[in-house]
Amino acid sequence: MISVGKKINNLGMITAIGIGDIMNCGSNALVIVCGDGWCHICLCLHPKSEDSEESTNVKLEPVHVQRIPPNTKVLILEDVDGDGSVEMVVGLTDRVVRSYRWVQSATGGRLVCLYKWECANQIGGLAINHNPEGIPKVLVAQPGGTIMKINPEIVLGSEEDEEQIERNENPLLSSVEYHPLMVSRTRNPGISTEIIADVSEGPSSTKEQGLPYVVATLDGTLMFVKNEEIIWSYQVDHQLFALNKLDVTGDGRDEIIACSWNGQTYILDQDKHSVRFHLEESVSTFCAGLYTLTAGASSSPCFIYVTFNNKVLVYYDIKIPKMVTTSLIANFKSNLDKKQLKQLYRWYLYGQPQPFNS
């Protein structure tokens, strides 16, 4: 039985949540945004060991509550301008993307809007991706496999600039580019799109070198993109609505996890090798990540499904040894001599003599 650690009630309709150091104080915070625009920030402070049992059922109190424009649908917490501070970027259902920064003051502090971008169409998802120069860019998924790329450049540095933020004046310079990632399978230019970015290529890959991103469309198309070039595309006969990245092979490289409404789950590596898993229930939402069932234990790869039958299904400790099938014969040839191979073939074909007997 899993017990509730901390909880907060009566927030209204929650539309987006995120965890990150939004206050830039060295401690993660839980950021909760509701449909009516109320943003709640709750600091995630680690309790002392002797107080851990008592803090299990302590009510979670927000340290800051603020009203922002309503209709938020997606939220990310990350450094989007390369200044070393975490910002909050939100996507709204009215085709607007806004970025916020926490500004500390003598009375406490508040979130200040840095910039507002208007999109041509509905927002499918948000992601932060680093280009080959290591510069972060905000990627906004647009219908039909189109990506809106925002290049924010921070120009702050003086006390006057900080005062501009306090007065809510725009301190950012930015450019916006549209990249239609068209493939032959794309049939509907209005089809919804999802995106994940900064896909790890291995232990030696870094954000400073640039990382690929993946785009999925509802009509069943997956595209692996690096340096604005589609490296490969993958088509399925199911509607893909959820997209995640997770290392399930343990080699340090992220695999791409895509899920459809009917429970078909696809696991692809970066060389396009795939494994398919079918959950025999219709899925309303899906996520994949590193989670643990016990406090203090190491995290393991997990798939989490929420079905239309009011079930939450957690598949824990998912590990795939290899994504590529290997030849048994090739393995034998590298480990056995000709005489042993001959005996092995005779045993497989005729059942005698026993292999490796003289």
Image (cartoon, rainbow, N blue to C red):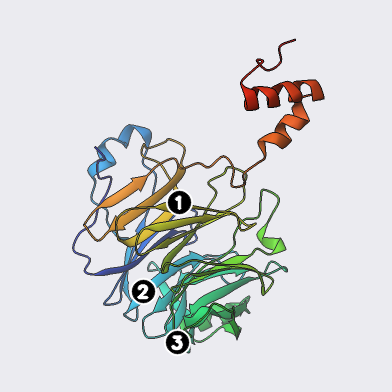
Question: Viewer-proximal residue, 41 or 104?
Answer: 41
Residue furthest right in the image: 338
- Which x, y percent locates residue 350? 63, 23
Amino acid type at image mark 1: Gly
Per the rendering, the mark at residue 121 is 3
- Which x, y percent locates residue 71? 32, 79
Label 3 vs label 2, nearer the camera: 3
What residue is drawn where x is 67% and y is 48%? Answer: 203
Residue 192 figure quarter: bottom left
Q: CA distance from mark 3 to mark 2?
A: 14 Å
Circle nearer the N terminus (2, 1):
2
Q: Is residue 349 above or below residue 323?
A: above
Label 1 SS: strand
Q: CA distance from mark 2 to mark 1?
A: 20 Å
What residue is drawn where x is 30% and y is 60%? Answer: 282
Question: Viewer-proximal residue, 129 or 169?
Answer: 129
Do the CB atoms of the residues marked 3 and 2 lie less than 8 Å apart?
no
Is residue 213 visible in the rendered structure shown here?
yes
Circle nearer the N terminus (1, 3):
3
Amino acid type at image mark 3: Asn
Q: Which residue is mark 1?
A: 289
236 left or right, relative to 38? right
- Which x, y percent locates residue 114? 50, 80
Count of numbered circles on the image: 3
Per the rendering, the mark at residue 305 is none
Label 2 SS: strand
- Badge 1 crowding class, 10 Å Cα cut-off, few under 14, some 14 to 19, many 20 or more, is some
